[in-house]
């Protein structure tokens, strides 16, 4: 029987490399069918936890955070777009437009995870597509509820979550946990609570790493 690998995908909806990394990981898992079984779940990380409700222009934000010029940002965006195309994720040609707060998106992902891995994955993909594919705000509750509906989840139940403080404590606790583990960049893929793969790696990197972990003696995993 194939060995089951437990994979925590630590990421933020606001992170374009997380969209690339997830698409690459899923391609790798397709290649590894029959070799490994996977228990994949999504963990919260906020790139900009202090971002206000109004958000910030993406060009201004990246210039302040990294000192990059509009030309450098355009080149980086095109590079990410190409990487996404290679793994089947379509980025919005003109980019994201603004950076938004993503805490409520993480609360909904936690809620979806309580219902099952499949439901959480579906919502994660819908949220990434809404922001990076369509340029819609992940801080807007209507956008979040549209993502919930497109993922086949209960829109009314999700609205109750958004209208409350449900899962806020749990999300904060998980964020703190991963910060304490030294996770300061995403995507971070943690396998069996021991093995770390960072960044939007190509599918073949994930295949090689996961195959090696799966084939290691039980006491070494």
Image (spheres, rainbow, N blue to C red):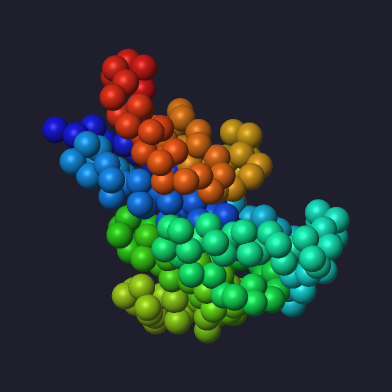
Task: Residue at 28%, 24% (x, y): give it.
Answer: 215
Q: Is residue 218 left or right of residue 76?
A: left
Whether residue 111 is visible to the viewer of this picture, yes or no, is no
**Residue at the image position 33 percent from the left and 63 percent from the top:** 119
Image coordinates of residue 104 in percent, x first then y, are 57, 68
Residue 149 image position (x, y, % from top left): 38, 79
* Near-viewer residue (219 or 114): 219
**Relative to 24, 117 lies left or right:** left
Q: Which residue lies furthest to the left in this view?
A: 1
Q: Give the side of residue 140 with respect to residue 21, left or right.
A: right
Q: Residue at x 36, y 22 (%)?
A: 221
Q: Which of 51/125 is in front?
A: 125
> In this orientation, which residue lies closer to the viewer: 65 or 44?
65
- Looking at the picture, does residue 195 appear above or below residue 66? above
Q: Residue 134: in sight, yes or no?
A: yes
What residue is at 22 percent from the left and 36 percent from the top? 35
- Give the quarter of the image for residue 116: bottom left
Q: In this view, does 4 lie above or below 123?
A: above
In the image, residue 179 above or below residue 46: above
204 or 144: nearer the viewer = 204
Total marks placed: 0
Residue 31 in percent (x, y) is at 28, 45
Q: Classify residue 26 as left or right of residue 130.
A: left
């Amino acid at each position: 029987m194939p060995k089951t690998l437990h994979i925590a995908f630590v990421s933020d909806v606001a992170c374009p490399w997380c969209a690339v990394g997830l698409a690459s990981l899923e391609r790798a898992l397709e290649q590894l069918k029959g070799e490994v079984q996977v228990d994949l779940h999504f963990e919260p990380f906020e790139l900009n936890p202090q971002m206000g409700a109004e958000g910030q222009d993406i060009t201004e934000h990246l210039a302040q955070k990294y000192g990059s010029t509009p030309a450098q940002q355009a080149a980086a965006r095109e590079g990410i777009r190409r990487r996404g195309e290679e793994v089947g994720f379509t980025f919005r040609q003109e980019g994201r437009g603004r950076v938004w707060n993503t805490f409520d998106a993480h609360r909904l992902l936690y809620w979806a995870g309580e219902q099952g891995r499949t439901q959480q994955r579906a919502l994660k993909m819908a949220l990434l597509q809404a922001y990076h594919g369509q340029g819609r705000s992940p801080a807007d509750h209507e956008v979040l509820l549209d993502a919930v509906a497109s993922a086949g989840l209960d829109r009314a139940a999700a609205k109750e979550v958004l209208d409350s403080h449900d899962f806020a404590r749990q999300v904060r606790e998980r964020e703190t946990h991963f910060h304490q583990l030294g996770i300061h960049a995403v995507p971070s893929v943690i396998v069996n609570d021991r093995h770390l793969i960072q960044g939007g790696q190509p599918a073949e990197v994930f295949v090689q790493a996961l195959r090696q972990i799966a084939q290691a003696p039980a006491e070494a995993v």
